[in-house]
Image (cartoon, grey):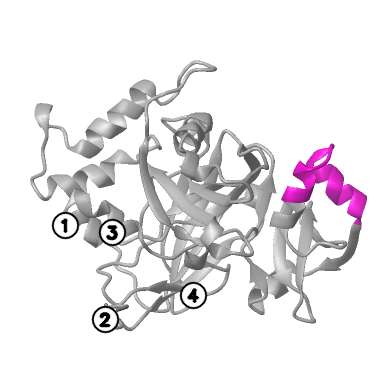
Amino acid sequence: MNLIQFFDANGERAVGAVDNGVARIVNDATSVHELALSALSRHGGLGALIAEKGLGAEVDRAALLAEGRMLAPIDHPDPAHLYVTGTGLTHLGSAATRDAMHKSNGTKTEEGLTDSMKMFRMGLEGGKPADGLKGVQPEWFYKGNGYSVVNPGHPIPSPGFALDAGEEPEIAGIYVIDQNGQPRRLGFALANEFSDHVTERVNYLYLAHSKLRACAFGPELRVGDLPGHIEGQSRIWRDGKVLWEKPFLSGEDNMSHTIANLEYHHFKYDLFRNPGDVHVHMFGTATLSFADGIKTQPDDIFEIEEAQFGMALRNPVRVETEHPVIVGNVY
């Protein structure tokens, strides 16, 4: 089962359940976050709660997207309580581009390896520990909060000061923190971890700056476990034609870390275990158009699809005008 959120024909929020490509309204539900919290307070879980509520009329997912009525598949009534974070160098092919960027600046460490290659090697050697054991820490970054999330189909804004506007096709884990401060996984979604790769290439220590950008995930939340092998397609459309296209791989079969290890090293911090908070945690990628010399332009459209996750995630690029920031005194 997949879940979607959208505005209905009256402009009211609604939740839909997707089964075998057919979406139906979940009765008496306006928020996946509320459904999740309700499910945590009772026996039976999310699936049982939805079955109890029952399903109503069928909805046309393609029409919702075309009309701009599709929402991200989870949000929080206070966007500051939704965290967007991620990990890098987690996939078996993910080190090559990063290493090339840093070598171009002459950045070397002992043994002739860049820091990226050292981190990647650490993951290969210790990212998949035996059951019940903690593995090596991954690279980790903060991306933003609910204010930085763009709904499926809507433009992803690139700030006027940005040097690049590049897609990153990823899988995101979706979590809610229960009343006891424990993370509870709802499922997974396609994600575009939109980043500024030129800024990152200037200096590896600019990685944090390069990640503070908007992002998108969805349009569907796949409830349940992550498939071991994921093979989707990442595309860039320009003027109605495909400018660039490449497959992307994910799932633990194609990763140097287990999902459990990545989850542990995120949620081990008390900061990320506040009851009711939502976490969208992106697991990384090995596929970037930037690596193939692509420079995006305004109105280019990113498309990320994988059949196991339902409909494709599509978002155009919009470049914003940079506004001056004036810091004043309160006194």
- Which residue is located at x 44 percent, y 79 percent? 239
Q: Is residue 186 above or below residue 119?
A: below
Where does label 1 land, which residue?
Answer: 202
Q: Are marks 4 and 3 in contact (CB under 8 Å)?
A: no
Q: Going from the N terminus, do you reach mark 3 or mark 1 first?
A: 1
Of the residues tagged 4 and 3, which is closer to the observer?
3
Q: Is residue 241 above or below residue 171?
A: below
Where does label 4 land, which residue?
Answer: 155
Residues rendered magenta in the picture: 37-54
Q: What is the spatial separation of the Cα atoms under label 1 and label 4, in whole angstroms?
A: 26 Å
For mark 4, give the secondary structure.
loop
Quarter of the figure that contains the C terminus:
bottom left
Where does label 3 land, which residue?
Answer: 209
Using the image as rendered, state which of residue 74 and residue 248 is in the foreground: 74
Q: Are marks 4 and 2 in contact (CB under 8 Å)?
A: no
For mark 3, give the secondary structure.
helix
Q: Position of residue 130 (x, y in %)?
A: 49, 15
